[in-house]
Image (tube, helix red, strand yellow):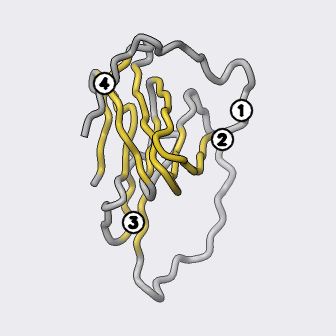
């Protein structure tokens, strides 16, 4: 199952639930995204030709993050770029999310372990703006 979190027609995040399965190569992102996300399911003895990735100059305006939930459960709260709370989703073990735009915060529900992948290098003091969410009434969407 794939979920798209949207606000005013813009995709904020893509969630890949653990029950997603499609044979072959399945890209969730268009070619223009600065972070590409795909599911690859291939049969035994399939071969992918050896290859190298060529140096290509890229311009990255926003940091996209991919989280791979290995254990536990966490709630992700989604915000617009204007820091307005929108909705929340719960992610569990073996689920993946690509955070594309807008803001987000996390609440750990059960002890969690996840892997985060994002573009670098990280620019301390410039890479993110923190804001308060103290008066937010949480709306968890199924």
Query: Of callouts 1 and 2, which one flags the residue occurring earlier in the amino acid sequence?
Result: 2
Determine whether label 3 and label 1 are within 8 Å by CB.
no
Tag in front: 1 or 2:
1
Mark 3 and mark 4 lie on one chain; the one further toward the N terminus is 4
Image quarter where the N terminus lies is bottom left
Evaluate if marks 3 and 4 touch, with contact meaning CB atoms under 8 Å apart. no
Q: Secondary structure at mark 3?
A: strand
- In primary-sequence order, the first of circles 1 and 4 is 4
Q: CA distance from mark 1 to mark 2?
A: 18 Å
Callout 3 crowding tier (Cα within 10 Å): few <14, some 14–19, many ≥20: few
Q: Viewed as shown, does residue 10 lie left or right of 103?
A: left
Q: Report the number of numbered marks.
A: 4
Q: Position of residue 93 (x, y in %)?
A: 45, 56
Give the label, 3 or 4, closer to the camera: 4
Q: CA distance from mark 3 to mark 4?
A: 28 Å
Q: Residue at x 34, y 24 (%)?
A: 138
| Residue 44, percent from left and from top | 44, 87
Which residue extends farthest bottom? 45
Q: Which mark is residue 122?
A: 1
Of labels 4 and 2, the one closer to you: 4
Image quarter (top left, top right, bottom left or bottom right) of the C terminus: top left
Residue that label 2 marks: 57
Q: On the image, which quarter does residue 84 sit in? A: top left
- Cα gap from disc 3 to disc 1, whole angstroms: 30 Å
Mark before the other along the chain sequence, 3 or 1: 3
Q: Which residue is mark 4?
A: 7
Q: Which x, y percent locates residue 68?
A: 51, 52
| Numbered mark located on residue 25 in the image | 3
Q: At 69% from the left edge and 38% from the top edge, which residue is drawn?
A: 120
């Amino acid at each position: 199952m794939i979920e798209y979190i949207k606000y005013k027609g813009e995709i904020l995040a893509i969630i890949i639930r653990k029950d997603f399965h499609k044979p072959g190569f399945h890209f969730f992102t268009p070619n223009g995204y600065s972070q590409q996300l795909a599911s690859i399911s291939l049969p035994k003895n399939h071969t992918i030709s050896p290859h190298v990735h060529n140096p290509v100059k890229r311009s990255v305006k926003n940091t996209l993050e991919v989280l791979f939930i290995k254990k536990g459960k966490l709630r992700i709260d989604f915000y617009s770029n204007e820091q307005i709370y929108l909705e929340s989703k719960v992610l569990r073990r073996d689920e993946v999310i690509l955070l594309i735009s807008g803001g987000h915060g996390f609440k750990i529900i059960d002890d969690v372990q996840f892997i985060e992948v994002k573009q670098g290098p990280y620019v301390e003091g410039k890479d993110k703006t923190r804001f308060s969410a103290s008066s937010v009434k949480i709306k968890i969407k199924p």
